[in-house]
Image: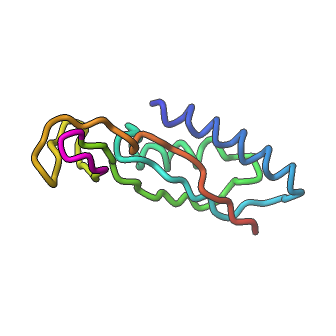
Amino acid sequence: MHEMSLCEGMRQVIEDQARAHNVSRIARVRVEIGRFAGVETRALQFAFDVVMRGSVAEGAELVTLDLPGRAMCYDCMTEVEIEERLDPCPLCGGGKLMPQGGDEMRIKDLEVA
């Protein structure tokens, strides 16, 4: 379960930011997750609750924000949203797409208590 190691990385970022801003408790963590990031949100929620024990984010709500998959179509030269990595262009049906986003995962913001 790589979600556990993702949460361990998140904990480090959260703890660092809490120290930098003199915050003693985090109430909510919003995380953006791209469609192609390969993150199972239910597993991430479970791992988050386990990993955050004893930290400033213990008991914090984890909110996941889904980001669409994006690709540049070299047939119609347009950036488009796609459901799956190998989908054709939804505008022209072309197959020459280069992924441009959707594989990212980042902490969007933290809400303090």
Residue 67, percent from left and from top: 40, 54
What span is in magenta?
74-79
Q: Residue most toward the left?
A: 93
Residue 33 appears left or right of 109: left
The colour scheme used to paint the residues is rainbow
Nearer the observer, 104 or 101: 101
Residue 42, percent from left and from top: 41, 49
**Residue at the location (15% across, 54% down)?**
91
Q: Quadrant of the C terminus?
A: bottom right
**Residue at the location (48% across, 30% down)?**
2
**Residue at the location (46% across, 59% down)?**
65
Residue 86: name its quadrant. top left
Nearer the observer, 99 or 57: 99
Residue 68, percent from left and from top: 35, 53
- Magenta-span inclusion, residue 5: no
Q: Residue most toward the bottom?
A: 113
Q: In this view, does 46 lie above or below 86?
A: below
Q: Magenta region's main secondary structure?
A: loop
Q: In this view, does 63 lie above or below 50?
A: below
Residue 70 appears left or right of 85: right
Residue 47, percent from left and from top: 53, 42
Counting labels gives 0
Nearer the observer, 18 or 57: 18
Q: Residue most toward the right?
A: 22
Residue 35 appears left or right of 2: left
